[in-house]
Image: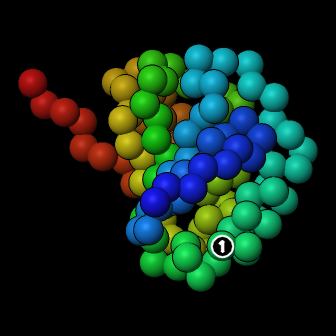
Amino acid sequence: MVETCEIGPLQVEMESSQLRFRFAAPDAMTLEIPMSLEEELSSYLAEHEERIAGSRLVIDLQDLPAISSRQLGIMLTIRKVCQPVGPIELEAVSEGVRYLLNLTKMAQYFNLPEAASD
């Protein structure tokens, strides 16, 4: 069973062995980052601590051909809050997003899947 909620600009899905974060509006390049995002994410993790323990943590970048600095900031906030739980994996990373993550050295903060080879 998948439980879904929205926290700020994020859609959060909790399954039995996975916690998945997605941007609720992936095409919105100018997302507002609520000042309370870190606090809201922390509260969510604390509330579901037992269920999340040992889960795979994923930021799903599906439908995101490019990424804004605000989206990068949100991703780093997710990483910061989830760091005690475990590493964050990225999924569905487009070549454009992969390029930017590598260019900005942000790829080092996430488990980035290998690029698809042709």
- Residue at point 30% right, 46% down? 113
User: At numbered mark 1, what does the secondary structure look like: helix, strand or loop?
Assistant: loop
Q: Position of residue 87 (x, y in %)?
A: 48, 65
- Residue at point 73% right, 64% down? 44
| Camera-nearest residue between 12 and 88 | 12
> Does residue 75 appear anywhere in the picture?
no
Which quadrant would the C terminus be assigned to in this image? top left
Left or right: 89 as drawn, with respect to 12: left
Tell me which corner region of the image, top left, top right, bottom left or bottom right, holds residue 74.
top right
Q: Residue furthest front?
A: 1
Q: Residue furthest right?
A: 35
Q: Residue furthest left?
A: 118
Give the labeled residue for mark 1: 48
Q: Position of residue 117 (x, y in %)?
A: 13, 31
Q: Position of residue 81 (x, y in %)?
A: 69, 63
Left or right: 79 as drawn, with respect to 2: right
